[in-house]
Image (cartoon, rainbow, N blue to C red):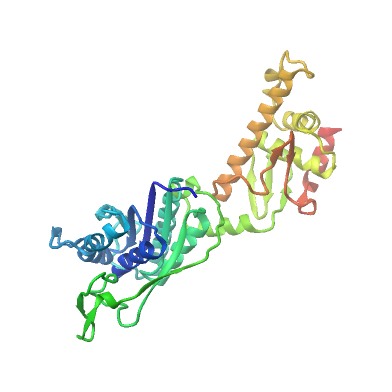
């Protein structure tokens, strides 16, 4: 099993910062998952409580050790760790459209902004292949936990996990209870009665989740797509694949499901070539595909073809010719990949809309009955006859 240099606990919190240390306790004692770092998404009110309760900081001044330092002291030696990185820089506060930090989430618009920031942070953390991410949805508003779990489904990897924590009756939502102590430690309950923190029970409830494995799109990290955009694009991608070539052929427009993309000449030519090979059931290898379909289609839709220059002086029966064909088709596929990844806001290539190549032949995993070239049949007749 692969070991990861970074293990990150990511949580949302509201008015109960204890969910962080409760989750930490359960992760370490039950699962042996020792985070190297803690990241938290919250509001300004939540941040102040995190600083006060977990780090012992009030009004910018260190007042006491804080619950996190106490936890490390109580359990570090037993479980083999001496520090867990968590400071003010690890707390992400939800902002409004003018980048003002929000005291609370009170409106649908603020809720939408929270969703965008949560999804973006999860995507950012999932970019690091050397990190394992554990997401806790125990704290914060219910919608924040939902957004966090959904984001993990979109971009999470095999090494990532999701949980909630369950706290035994009498200790849940107690302001002075942060985790079960390994020794007797008396706290005052909400009703004023004494409680022994040693008797508290915290259990990790792991949550099964679907890994859509879409990869992290650049647009999300650059803040050019939103949470709602990512939902819609994921729905479009997960729908049964359907490809329709739109007229006229010179426009190079293809409808993938409900999404219309204008392709570059190379990308359009490779996709149409693979589709025609599939429709005609010819099973052409890549060099045959290039001669029969790609070259005439590309030359027809791109005035003044650059391919003539690339193949000038190269005999069609030579290994140099075969190698150049291989390069051209690889470039064309890469061009198609870029367009589709950008249109669907994904960062993966193993989807039905992208042809795969094995044993010198391209394959497109879309059923024939869901592929249509009717709109360009007349154009194709002129090109290929």
Q: Looking at the picture, does residue 124 appear above or below residue 271?
A: below
Residue closest to the eye, 257 or 149 = 149
Q: Quadrant of residue 358?
A: top right
Horizontally, residue 62 falls left or right of residue 219, namely: left
Farthest right residue?
385
Residue in view at x 81 percent, y 33 percent: 383
Question: Does residue 235 appear in the picture of this structure?
Answer: yes
Residue in view at x 66 percent, y 44 percent: 354
Question: Does residue 223 appear in the picture of this structure?
Answer: no
Residue closest to the eye, 301 or 322 = 322
Q: Position of residue 87 (x, y in %)?
A: 25, 54
Q: Position of residue 77 (x, y in %)?
A: 27, 57
Q: Looking at the picture, does residue 371 appear above or below residue 332?
A: below
Residue in view at x 69 percent, y 38 percent: 268
Q: Looking at the picture, does residue 293 appear above or below residue 212?
A: above
Q: Looking at the picture, does residue 20 appear above or below residue 175?
A: above
Q: Quadrant of residue 197?
A: bottom left
Q: Quadrant of residue 96?
A: bottom left
Quadrant placement of the C terminus? top right
Horizontally, residue 11 falls left or right of residue 62, namely: right
């Amino acid at each position: 099993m692969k070991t990861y240099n970074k293990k990150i606990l990511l949580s949302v919190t509201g008015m109960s910062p204890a969910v962080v240390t409760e989750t930490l306790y359960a992760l370490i004692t039950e699962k042996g998952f020792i985070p190297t770092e803690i990241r938290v998404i919250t509001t300004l009110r939540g941040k102040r409580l995190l600083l006060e309760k977990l780090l012992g900081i009030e009004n910018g001044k260190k007042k006491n050790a804080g619950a996190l330092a106490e936890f490390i002291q109580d359990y570090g030696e037993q479980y083999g760790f001496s520090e867990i990185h968590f400071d003010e820089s690890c707390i992400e506060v939800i902002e409004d459209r003018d980048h003002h930090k929000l005291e609370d989430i009170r409106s649908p618009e603020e809720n939408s902004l929270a969703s965008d920031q949560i999804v973006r942070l999860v995507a950012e953390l999932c970019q690091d292949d050397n990190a394992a991410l554990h997401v806790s949805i125990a704290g914060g508003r219910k919608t924040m936990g939902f957004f966090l779990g959904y984001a993990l489904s979109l971009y999470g990897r095999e090494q990532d996990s999701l949980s909630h924590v369950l706290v035994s009756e009498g200790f849940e939502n107690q302001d002075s209870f942060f985790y079960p102590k390994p020794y007797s430690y008396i706290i005052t309950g909400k009703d004023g009665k004494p409680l022994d923190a040693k008797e508290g029970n915290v259990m990790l409830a792991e949550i099964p989740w679907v890994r859509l494995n879409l990869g992290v799109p650049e647009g999300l990290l650059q803040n050019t797509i939103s949470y709602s955009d990512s939902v819609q694009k994921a729905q479009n991608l997960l729908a049964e694949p359907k490809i329709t070539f739109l007229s006229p052929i010179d426009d190079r427009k293809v409808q993938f499901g409900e999404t219309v993309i204008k392709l570059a000449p190379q990308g359009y030519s490779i996709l149409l070539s693979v589709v025609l090979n599939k429709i005609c059931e010819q099973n052409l290898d890549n060099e045959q595909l290039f001669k029969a379909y790609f070259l005439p289609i590309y030359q027809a839709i791109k005035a003044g073809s650059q391919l003539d220059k690339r193949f000038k002086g190269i005999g069609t029966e030579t290994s140099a010719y075969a190698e150049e064909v291989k390069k051209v088709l690889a470039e064309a596929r890469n061009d198609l990949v870029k367009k589709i990844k950008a249109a669907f806001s994904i960062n993966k290539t193993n989807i039905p809309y992208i042809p795969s190549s094995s044993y010198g032949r391209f394959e497109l995993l879309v059923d024939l009955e869901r592929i249509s070239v009717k709109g360009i049949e007349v154009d194709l007749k002129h090109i290929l006859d």
